[in-house]
């Protein structure tokens, strides 16, 4: 560790992370944020009681309808477990999947296996593969960290589309701050205007089939359709390793090797692009979350973080082929100076101006706390 780098006394977040501060005990603000969220979202008996009240509310809203709740699926651990959880609580979930045409074979098999064994219907939106490849290439040319943001945002839109089509009032998201940690503002940003501005500047195709979360449409889904977003894993003592074992034994689910590795563009972004071009290793957030929740010792995390992330050469080969890029052109892009969302038009200033409105939307579960904390503040 470099002499000028300061590490949190509790987790492995350090002074190279955006917007980090330390108190008199050397504890970082992300640990303090975790502690606040831990109180807001209790686990144990109190958490199960909150989850039961959530389920009862969802069931009441779903009376007379075919489905109670939309659950996004990727073939990953969290979304697969949420399908099991929903059925265990007697809910009638509709699975929703955005296919960016870069899914791994394991992800596809996991989705099919879980849905078949739990008898759950699937709502899918598939983007035109040539269009998506062009958008993905545009983000690489833009030299920003969020090359996979079009997929992440399109998945959120797919959830809303499924809910609107079937009159469903609730969406379950499979995030746990105890296992995934808290990503700092500045490492990841996304909104529809941002995606559109980058594609207009660097792309060769118009956006036609990629689901876009335009602000007017988003407000319609929240304020008119009254579709709410909830995160049930916040109320559970959620152990990732135990969950993976459970899913494998009960559903023949397959582990795909690491967080965000069930999709090829996500694999590329997290295992190659972010570390190599921007020096960003998202495992710092993940390991820090596990340390705070008592699932990983700090000493072990410091050892694990030294292990290079897996790098499947076939992923890079697929990038070259599908994006019609030579290795030389790709390396030229990788070596471009890094930029951020601040270099392109986005909704960021609008989000900041609307912070009081988003606070109300947060209180009524129309948005998540992570959105409010990261996107509606100046950073």
Image (cartoon, rainbow, N blue to C red):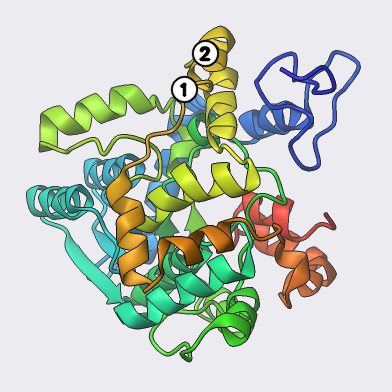
From the image, which quarter does the C terminus lie in?
Answer: bottom right
From the image, which quarter does the N terminus lie in?
Answer: top right
Report the residue marked by disc 2. Answer: 303
Q: Observer-nearest residue: 134 or 249?
A: 134
Q: Observer-nearest residue: 279 or 372?
A: 279
Instruction: Identify the residue at image location x=30%, y=63%.
Output: 102
In the image, is 50 to the left or to the right of 345?
left
Instruction: Identify the residue at image location x=48%, y=34%.
Output: 235
The answer to the question of whether label 2 and label 1 lie on touching residues, with beta carbons closer than 8 A, is yes
| Furthest residue toward right | 24
Residue 116 visible from this viewpoint: yes
Q: Secondary structure at mark 2?
A: helix
Report the residue marked by disc 1. Answer: 307
Residue 227, compared with residue 164, is above or below; it is above
Q: Observer-nearest residue: 244 or 346?
A: 346
Residue 167, compared with residue 236, is above or below; it is below
Between the residue at mark 2 and the residue at mark 1, the CA separation in whole angstroms equals: 7 Å
């Amino acid at each position: 560790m470099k002499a000028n780098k300061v590490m949190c006394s509790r987790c492995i977040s350090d002074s190279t992370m955006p917007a980090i501060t330390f108190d008199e005990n050397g504890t970082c603000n992300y640990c303090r944020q975790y502690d606040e969220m831990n109180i807001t979202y209790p686990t144990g008996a109190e958490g199960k009681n909150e989850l039961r009240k959530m389920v009862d509310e969802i069931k009441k809203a779903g009376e007379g309808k075919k489905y109670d709740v939309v659950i996004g699926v990727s073939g990953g651990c969290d979304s697969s477990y949420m399908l099991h959880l929903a059925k265990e609580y007697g809910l009638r979930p509709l699975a929703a999947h955005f296919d960016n045409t870069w899914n791994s074979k394991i992800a596809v098999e996991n989705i099919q296996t879980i849905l078949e064994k739990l008898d759950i219907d699937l709502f899918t939106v598939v983007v035109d593969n040539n269009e998506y490849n062009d958008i993905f290439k545009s983000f690489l040319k833009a030299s920003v960290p969020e090359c996979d943001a079009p997929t992440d945002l399109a998945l959120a839109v797919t959830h809303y589309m499924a809910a609107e089509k079937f009159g469903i009032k609730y969406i379950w998201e499979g995030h746990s701050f105890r296992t995934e940690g808290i990503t700092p503002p500045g490492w990841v940003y996304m909104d529809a205007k941002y995606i559109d501005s980058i594609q207009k500047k660097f792309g060769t195709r118009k956006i036609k089939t990629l689901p876009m979360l335009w602000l007017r449409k988003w407000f319609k889904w929240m304020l008119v359709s009254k579709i709410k977003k909830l995160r049930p894993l916040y109320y559970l003592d959620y152990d990732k390793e135990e969950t993976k074992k459970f899913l494998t034994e009960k559903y023949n689910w397959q582990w795909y090797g690491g967080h965000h590795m069930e999709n090829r563009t996500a694999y590329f972004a997290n295992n190659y692009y972010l570390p190599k071009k921007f020096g960003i290793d998202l495992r710092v957030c993940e390991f820090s979350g596990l340390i705070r929740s008592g699932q990983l010792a700090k000493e072990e995390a410091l050892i694990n973080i030294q292990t290079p992330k897996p790098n499947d050469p076939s992923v890079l080969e697929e990038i070259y082929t599908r994006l019609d890029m030579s290795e030389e052109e790709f390396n030229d892009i990788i070596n471009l100076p890094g930029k951020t969302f601040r270099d392109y038009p986005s909704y960021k200033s609008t989000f900041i101006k609307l912070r009081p409105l988003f606070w109300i939307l947060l209180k009524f579960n129309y948005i998540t706390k992570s959105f409010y904390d990261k996107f509606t503040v100046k950073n």
